[in-house]
Amino acid sequence: MTDLLAPLAAIVGAANLLTAPHDIAPFITDYRGRYHGAPLAVALPASRDEVAALVRFCAAHRIAIVPQGGNTSTCGAATPDGSGRQLLIAFRRLNRIRAVDAANQTITVEAGCTLAAVQAAAADAGLLFPLSLASEGSCQIGGNLSTNAGGLAVLRFGTMRELTWGWRWCCRTASCWTR
């Protein structure tokens, strides 16, 4: 499997393909310490094109993918198993606020944006992004969406999927509320 590392590094750049034990350590155990794993490598893509290239490469070489957001994981799905045959794709570099449209009460962000950054961008536009979690400073929108996070205001505003109008590779369009 190590012969696959060079082509993977060519996709995201050598500095963004982590293989050293001390570099991958923060990614292989969930926040609560319940789940531990050993990936082939950790890829840190910076664009949806890089994510798409990683997915194509992994499909062609039958490599399982483990997507990971903020690794706050209360469900354990963002931690690789111990086989060393999975590529962990962490979305922390996909952290841009693409657009805030106050008139339509929408915000378009990348999957690696923290929930706190999305809330702040909405607030700057006079809006409220109502999802609220204890881990909002580290959890990421992609993880919130994939786990259908509910949070403190779920009964009033709904779950993350109910706050989402549409999505595409690494970009999310979510609804906000007028303050």
Image: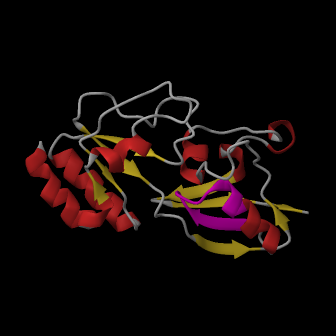
The image quarter containing residue 29 is top left
Residue 39 rendering spot, x and y as whole percentages = 29, 39
Q: Is residue 53 left or right of residue 149?
A: left
Relative to 89, does residue 45 appear above or below in the rendering? below
Q: Is residue 120 left or right of residue 35?
A: right
Give the residue at x 22% y 46%.
59
Relative to 43, does residue 160 appear above or below in the rendering? above
The image quarter containing residue 126 is bottom right
Of 29 and 124, nearer the camera is: 29
- Give the magenta range: 106-118
Q: Is residue 111 found inside the magenta-colored segment of the image? A: yes
Quadrant in which the C terminus is drawn: bottom right
Residue 116 rendering spot, x and y as whole percentages = 70, 57
Q: How is the image coloured?
A: secondary structure
Give the residue at x 36% y 34%.
80
Give the residue at x 34% y 50%.
23
